[in-house]
């Protein structure tokens, strides 16, 4: 046992802090934590020199520093890449976040009366107008919107939630709809078969204990072949006859006609589903919508009001920065409605709408920045992030043997060759220091 091999924290910190951009207190704390297992290994008899330990800790500190959240370059051509932070926010919305973040704001004050105002009131009203719903509200993410909605709409003796077996999806990160459903206190009643669910399957499952019928949009996989499900209009009539709310978890929540933006399928829009009889839709803020992480609940005003009264709502309500970001993205959508040429306001929409021809110049410019041989080849892009599994669209990529030497670049590797798709490659813009 040679505990003398342990370096002095102070000396090591002085040495390592020079090569890092971290405050010294963080480096000191990090070293202390690293030394704990080193000491144990020495006590266990491992032969370790001071140089070994120093080198190991320097390496660990570099990895730790690299894990700090920062902008990266997405050359994968996948628009909504959950590992790369899903949708990038537009600059106009991001600037509004900066302004609200660094100043006091009218978060819960009515500027006209000076009295207490409604938190998120402007956002809720604008969202309702955008998705053509009676009312809307926002929570931290779509998973939270599902748990909250179920909690609010079940009651003593009425806890059963009917879901088709074809819709019991895993939404990512290992989370499955049945598990999310049970955490809310609801009891899952599965109906139908994996490939087919009939209206009569739903009908037979309805009892006096039924709280609601839940539809879950198959947002990250598709069923093909001998499949079938009842028409939404028929399901709505059935739910209405039994006075049971019909709720749909849409997952992505594309607000635009995706099939008009790109040569891909049509993703059901919240406004369409509400128009077809769904009484509440739930969808994500940071998938195809292109906003911040959020879960949006829109539909019947009495149901939305009930949801906002559920105590759990307080635990999942978003902060002012998210409210600001989403508010501005909603404004962007309404601006685009007035002027369809303004897709640039919402990066995801702009990137989705570009054709390979539109990307040619960007690909050539990228080639010039890359050392060594490269060629421009046709590829396919995808929406990704558990959205629209069938939707692949033609794109372009700069193909190289080595990964292009750009900071924190992610490429798509096919047949050992790097493909950098200019569609998702955005110029890294960082905020000017005030
Ligand atoms: C992605 C997804 C969710 C989860 O959305 P988050 O905003 O990530 O919580 C829920 N349901 C479906 C169908 C989804 O596709």
Image (cartoon, helix red, strand yellow):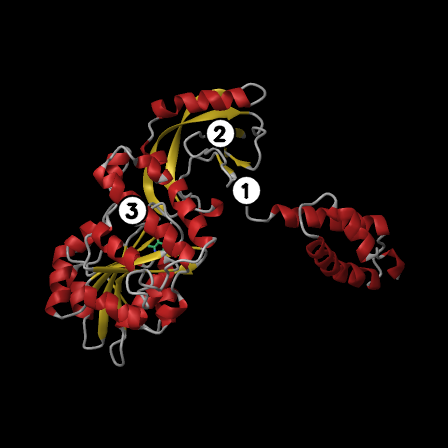
Residue carrying label 3: 331
- Could you tell me how far apart the alpha carbons at marks 3 and 2 are, in whole angstroms? 35 Å
Question: Callout 1: few (<14), some (14-19), or many (20+) C-alpha neighbours within 10 Å?
Answer: few
Give the number of the mark in front: 1 or 3.
1
Q: Is residue 208 above or below residue 201?
A: below
- Quadrant holding the N terminus: bottom right
Determine the residue positioned at 51% across, 39% down: 430
Residue carrying label 2: 419
- On the rendered structure, is 6 left or right of 398? right
Give the number of the mark in front: 3 or 2.
3
Secondary structure beneath dot 3 equals: helix
- Could you tell me how far apart the alpha carbons at marks 2 and 1 are, in whole angstroms? 34 Å
Does any atom of ligand 1 lie closer than 8 Å to the CB of label 3?
Answer: no
The answer to whether mark 2 and mark 1 are in CB contact below 8 A is no
- Residue 126 seen from this side: yes
User: What residue occupies the far bottom of the structure in this picture?
Assistant: 156
Q: Earlier in the sequence, mark 2 or mark 1?
A: 2
Determine the residue positioned at 31% across, 57% down: 296
- On the rendered structure, is 364 left or right of 329? right
Residue placed most toward the observer, 392 or 67: 67
Q: Position of residue 214 (x, y in %)?
A: 25, 63
Q: Earlier in the sequence, mark 3 or mark 2?
A: 3
């Amino acid at each position: 046992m040679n505990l003398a091999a342990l370096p002095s924290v102070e000396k090591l910190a002085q040495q390592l802090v020079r090569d890092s951009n971290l405050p010294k207190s963080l480096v000191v704390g990090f070293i202390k934590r690293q030394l704990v297992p080193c000491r144990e290994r020495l006590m266990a008899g491992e032969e370790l020199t001071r140089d070994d330990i120093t080198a190991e800790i320097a390496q660990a500190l570099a990895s730790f520093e690299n894990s700090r959240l920062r902008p990266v370059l997405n050359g994968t051509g996948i628009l909504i890449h959950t590992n790369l932070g899903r949708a990038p926010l537009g600059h106009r919305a991001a600037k509004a976040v900066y302004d609200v973040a660094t100043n006091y704001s009218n978060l819960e004050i009515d500027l006209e009366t000076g009295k207490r105002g409604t938190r998120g009131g402007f956002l809720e009203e604008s969202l309702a107008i955008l998705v053509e719903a009676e009312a809307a509200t926002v929570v931290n993410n779509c998973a939270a919107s599902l748990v909250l909605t179920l909690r609010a709409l079940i009651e003593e003796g009425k806890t059963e939630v009917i879901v088709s077996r074809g819709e019991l999806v895993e939404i990512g990160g290992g989370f499955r709809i049945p598990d999310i459903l049970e955490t809310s206190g609801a009891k899952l009643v599965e109906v139908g078969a994996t490939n087919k669910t009939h209206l009569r399957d739903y009908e037979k499952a309805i009892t006096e204990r039924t709280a609601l019928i839940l539809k879950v949009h198959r947002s990250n996989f598709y069923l093909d072949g001998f499949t079938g499900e009842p028409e939404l209009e028929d399901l709505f009539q059935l739910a209405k006859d039994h006075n049971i709310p019909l709720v749909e978890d849409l997952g992505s929540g594309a607000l635009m006609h995706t099939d008009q933006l790109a040569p891909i399928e049509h993703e059901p829009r919240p406004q369409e589903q509400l128009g077809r009889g769904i009484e509440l839709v739930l969808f994500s803020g940071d998938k195809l919508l292109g906003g911040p992480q959020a879960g949006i609940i829109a539909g019947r005003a009495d149901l939305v009001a009930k949801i906002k009264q559920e105590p759990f709502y307080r635990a999942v309500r978003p902060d002012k920065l998210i409210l600001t970001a989403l508010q501005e993205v909603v404004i962007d959508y309404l601006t685009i409605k007035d002027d369809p040429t303004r897709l640039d306001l919402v990066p995801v929409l702009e990137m989705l709408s570009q054709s390979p021809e539109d990307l040619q110049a960007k690909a050539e410019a990228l080639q010039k920045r890359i050392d060594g041989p490269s060629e421009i080849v046709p590829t396919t892009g995808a929406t990704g992030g558990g959205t629209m599994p069938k939707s692949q669209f033609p794109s372009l990529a700069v193909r190289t043997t080595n990964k292009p030497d750009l900071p924190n670049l992610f490429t798509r590797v096919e047949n050992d060759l790097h493909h950098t798709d200019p569609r998702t490659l955005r110029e890294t813009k960082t905020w000017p220091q005030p």
